[in-house]
Amino acid sequence: MPDILAGLGLAPGIVHWMVLTAALFAVGLYGILTRRSAVGVLMAVELLLNSAALSFVVFNHFRMPALVDGQVMAVFVIAVAAAEVVVGMAVFVALYRVSHTVDLNRLDRLKNDEVKP
Amino acid sequence: MSGAVAALPFILRNAWLVAAIPFVSFVFVGLVLRPKVPRIAGVVATLSIFAAAGVAGGVAWEYYHLFPPGALHPAIVPFAFEWLRFMPGLTVTMGVLLDPISVLLLLVVTSVSALVHLYSIGYMHGDPGFGRFFTFLNLFTFSMLGLVIAPNILQIYVFWELVGVSSFLLIGYYYEKPSAVAASKKAFIVTRFADLGFLIGVLILGYNGYTAFGDVGPTVAREVTGRIATDLQPFDFLYLTHPDLLGRLAAPALAVGGVSLLTIAMILVFMGAAGKSAMFPLHIWLPDAMEGPTPVSALIHAATMVVAGVYLVARLFPAFAFSGDALTVVMCVGAFTSLFAAVIGCTQDDIKRVLAFSTLSQLGYMMFALGVAAMDRPAGYTASMFHLFTHAFFKALLFLGAGAVIHAVHTNSIWEMGALRRKMPITHLTFLVATLAIAGVWPLSGFFSKDEILAAALRGGHPVVFGLGLLVAALTAFYMFRIYIVVFLGRARHEHAEHAHEAPFVMWAPLALLALLSAVAGFVPFGSFVGIGAEAGHEGIDLAVAIPASTAGVLGIGLAFLLYSGDGARATAGANALGGAYRVVKRKFYVDELYLFVTHRIIFRHISRPIAWFDRHAVDGMVNLSGWTTRRTGSLLGALHGGRVQAYGVWLVGGTLFLLLVLWSAAF
């Protein structure tokens, strides 16, 4: 599809792609900070990983098209993301068994319990 | 230096045994026997003191063998070891100093203490604290012996405080009784307060003695060479009482406000001595010290503790005499206490309290006897030590006799006794001997020593003191016969007195021995044994003194019989006639009340309370403020630690952005 757009004289430059990855990253970050469900947060983390993978591909394409290093990195990121989801979901299932919730606002057992002097 | 000392007889070189034996026994009885087999604690403790008395006898024998009676009696230090080395040339030793008064005190302390120990086996029989009692009794004797043999002023101070603490332990022996606890605290605080003066005096003497040591030391060291086991040290009595040093201390250059430094130091030292010897106005602890068991009272009043003050003044006598003014203070305080206590003694109802005031009065006698002496007129010095010697025996006897009576009738009040003459014949007889001795009746020991003191006062040019002494002698005879008549003669005033029985052998045997000593101690030719300076003490009886003194005694005895024989109605009538004056005397001139007023109303309210407030609010406040600040900061920061992962994430992102912003703005 880039080729078609390039043919139309609308070929997106590196800046456009950067804006896209930044937007993707921002959406992911927002999701991480605001989703109440742990599963939602995991999905938002996927967005972050994908925005990083996309930047690898974009830089590979625009800076050193002869090589494939960036694309290899993107494949790695996808593999890591898959592994991370497996571990993350397993943790959440275990967590749910203990505390019957995956609501992050209620999973606050590390908090400072005021010790009365 | 030690060649001559090494040639001394074995027993003199090992005179430290006299204090070491009670110490070893104290540790053994306290740590082993008391928890395991308290029943034999008394026997072991008593045997150790008898052993110490044997050593003391040997020491006295060899000392007077070496320096025969009538000749000069120099002080020797046959044993000493280095205890503290502050720096080269400033070392404190511990050791043994032997001179006539320390040898005398060794004999008196060990013999009286041994008899008191023996008596206590019977008196304390069945008491739950039997082992503890003998532990403390041994400690007390050890402390006193260490004090007596001290060759330097620091050792005497160390043992001085040990005597204080062991008397505290023994007066508070019945620690379940609030009055005993109060009495022990009172004794400790009053003597400790007095010791503050002693300590300052020691510091003044020690500091100035040390600074002058470079100049005066070698001369003194040459004089004492061959008599001392170690090198002469700045704190040694041999150095501190040397005229060369005293001359320097009394120099006008060192005077403060027109009073020579020597006088100031000696008056401060006398303050400590007055505290221990219970001189007015520091006498208030002694009558309350009766709360301890009676053998303890006997020990405190006869052999240990109270004679320590007199002994200290005698030990530093050359310094007091050189100062002159300090010796006048000793005389005045002694004479006043002697009269003051005798007057109070006439009104007390508790048999032990009467004896306590009589001790005060007799100690005043010893003090003023020292006060009227001088280096070239040492009769008073000899007389004072003579009276200390005889008083130890008859006062111990009086207390032990009173203990036997209290043991039999279970009360201290003389008005619940009476007619004990037939129930307790041995106690009665020994008590009578002691009473006659303290009243100064010929030929018992008190007559001779009182005679010496009065003669010394008269010849020393102090007729007022002599007159006061006569008055006190009459009062002494009066109050002693007052209790004798009320307790032993007449009829039984209470059912307890009717069921009284004689004390067991272990109790009356010491009484009999002490009675024998009280009777014959006066015939010791004391002047040829104990003296200071060149002239031997006054010998023989001076009729110009003996007749008025005996007359005063007889008058006192007669007055006592007149008032108290029969039903005592004349005494009651007399007390009523005196009215207010009698009540003032009976309440001991309100000195205790005055002390309470001064301490509670003035010192506590106006000094201690503000200091306590400052301590609680300012000093503690600073500490609390730092604690409060830390805790408050912690709880504020703790609020950030909410346990919510996403909140941490917000802080992380926000912080990163903030840092980026900072770096970005710094870059441009």
Image: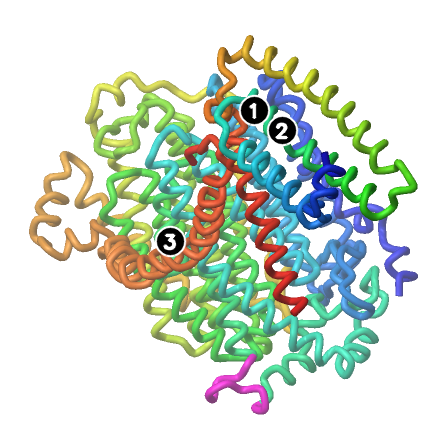
Q: Is residue B452 above or below residue B575?
A: below
The figure's colour scheme reads: rainbow
Q: Do the residues labelled 1 and 3 touch (CB within 8 Å)?
A: no
User: Residue placed at 52% from the left, 18% from the top?
Assistant: A102
Q: In this view, does B73 lie above or below B205?
A: above
Q: Magenta includes A71?
A: no
The residue indicated by pointer 2 is B30
Find numbered disc 1 in the image and state the secondary structure of the residue it sits on.
helix
Q: Give the mark nearer the N terminus: 2 vs 1.
A: 2
The reply to whether dot 2 and dot 1 touch (C-beta < 8 Å) is: yes
If you read the primary sequence from the N terminus, does the residue marked by circle 3 or circle 2 appear first? 2
Do the residues at discs 3 and 2 belong to one chain?
A: yes
In the rendered structure, the residue with mark 2 lies on which chain?
B
On residue B571, the disc is none
Residue topped by disc 1:
B131
Q: In the rendered image, which residue does mark 3 sit on?
A: B616
Q: Distance between the residues labelled 1 and 3?
A: 43 Å
Horizontal side, residue B222 vs residue B277: left or right: right
The residue sitting at 46% across, 47% down in the picture is: B444
